Image (cartoon, rainbow, N blue to C red):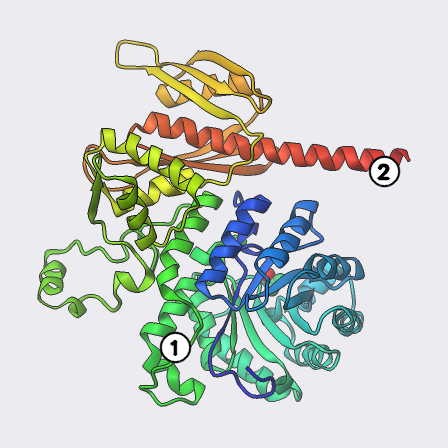
Amino acid sequence: MSMGSPADRVIIFDTTLRDGEQSPGATLNVEEKLAIAHQLALLGVDVIEAGFAVASPGDFAAVKAIAEQVGIQGGPIICSLARATRQDIQAAAEALKPAARPRIHTMISTSDIHLQYQLKKSRSEVLAIASEMVAYAKSFVDDVEFSPMDASRTDREFLYEVLQQAIAAGATTINIPDTVGYCTPKEIGILIAGIREHVPNIHQAILSIHTQNDLGLATANALAAIEHGVRQVECTINGIGERAGNAALEEIVMALQVRKPFFNPYFGRAVDADAPLTNIKTQEIYKTSSLVSQLTGMLIQPNKAIVGANAFAHESGIHQDGILKHRQTYEIMEAGSIGLPENRIVLGKHSGRNAFRTRLKELGFELNETDLNKAFNRFKEVADKKKEISDWDLEAIVRDEMQIQVESGYQLEHVQVICGDCTCPTATITIVTPDGKILTDASVGTGPVDAVYQAINRLVQIPNQLIEFSVQSVTGGIDALGTVTIRLEYQERIFSGQASDTDIVVAAAYAYINAINRLYWYLQTKNEVLQSSATVSSR
Ligand code: KIV
């Protein structure tokens, strides 16, 4: 796409790993971020905002690893956020070095309320900082994005001036954040039209939008911005993000796909022009959404547009009747277009490794031999208990087995529970500790899951508070796999875990161990950081 002329499609800037990770409890480790970044590349996003390099050593390592492994030739642009300070920009530039196409995204607040209470700076100071820091970022990379934070509540004349200066200093993308999710679609349209009219050099940059969802308007606002000439949209998978989240990538992309004839004219095309309006491979949407939900522990509400469990389900008799007669009576898109597998019964306990591998491949899972063996063994265990294994079961099995593990975590060896109406729920748990010790302990609890968690707590001795526990059935039927998702809190940080099993108490135990391992890894990293800073300061 050439600068200066409006792009003939929408650039998808995915910020799941930066703004998305700012959702309470969505903290991801480096391996998990890498797994998501690889999947985002498969999905076909144009830009991955991989993190906020200066924020922590973990963030820095993640941006660097993604730049190295995903930001290869032919891969997406890799971006790091940086406040408009030298230290932030240096950290971003350093972490992005390995990327074939690095982008620094620098930002500073511009609204009076932010200037007065948060930055304690005058407009002229902010103006000077913005252009100086854009130029500084430009000394490291060609591709610089600038965001005036809280743009939608910024005085218009001041906003135009800041944008003009930022472009003059070298910004190649100008992003307009509705930071507090305050605008309506009509207001967003007026804001963008005003910028295009009053910023004389705006045609030298790509215009971008970043919409938060505080009033549930993020997607509508992003689409309104596109109608008014914005050609980059910042969005996240499943709409996760700070507070109520961001515009959901899947909603933006499918709106542009399903309503292409409506949007085509805004791109100067014929109404019936066929070329897609984004580069996204929509068949990868469902897989990406499930991966993000699993790794962040943020469940998708059943009625969530596009990726919710009910998004393609028809309950009412009238609707079902219509669907049977002609699908398009009640369906504007096909489940297959987002890669949603049909819940077909595909395998059973007599199915062999080859059939298993072939079906997984058809579902888009390419496993190496070790992972395939692990997943196959687990499949056999489940197939012993559950006669028919559907695509959805397969997916849950693979996701469980593929969970990003580090070698030093706790392993669950055995779970045994006694419960019922005439007995005190009691759990006996055996685990292997990170240093290889086998430990067993037992506890009573208010119910079987509580007893399991109390016993695990006695063994691992890491204080934490369970704040969320949920069970979802993967398929219907009494022998269905149940997926347990939990969130626990430690010193105001939230850690999640997920696991599936036909026995939900067993799934609960595995989910808890997963979350405990994340907490354990966090404590390990924190300790390493503390130890290395102690060594530095004692020198
Ligand atoms: O919400 C916001 O303003 C942001 C910017 C950094 C784009 O996240």
Q: Which mark is residue 62?
A: none
Tell me the quarter of the image containing the N terminus: bottom right
Query: Is residue 402 depicted above or below 120 in this figure?
Result: above
Distance from the alpha carbon under mark 1 to that under mark 2: 54 Å
Crowding at mark 2 (Cα within 10 Å: few <14, some 14-19, many 20+): few
Label 2's element? helix
Crowding at mark 1 (Cα within 10 Å: few <14, some 14-19, many 20+): some
Task: Using the image as rendered, state which of residue 392 and residue 148 is in the foreground.
Answer: 392
Q: Which mark is residue 276?
A: 1
Tell me the quarter of the image containing the C terminus: top right
Question: Quadrant location of ligand 1?
Answer: bottom right
In the picture, measured across the screen, residue 128 lies left or right of residue 400, that is right
Label 2 beta carbon less than 8 Å to ligand 1: no
Using the rendered view, name the quadrant where residue 4 is placed. bottom right
Which residue position is annotated with label 2?
Answer: 536
| x, y percent for residue 137 | 75, 68
- Res. 186 visible in picture: no
Query: Is residue 38 depicted above or below 115 in this figure?
Result: above
Label 1 beta carbon less than 8 Å to ligand 1: no
- Res. 36 visible in picture: yes
| Residue at the right extreme, as displayed | 539
In the picture, measured across the screen, residue 140 lies left or right of residue 339, that is right
- Residue at image coords 25%, 58%: 312
Mark 1 and mark 2 residues within 8 Å of each other at the beta carbon:
no
Q: Amino acid at mark 1?
A: Pro
Using the rendered view, name the quadrant where residue 47 is placed. bottom right
| x, y percent for residue 70 | 57, 59
Task: Using the image as rendered, state which of residue 67 and residue 350 is in the foreground.
Answer: 350
Label 1's element? loop
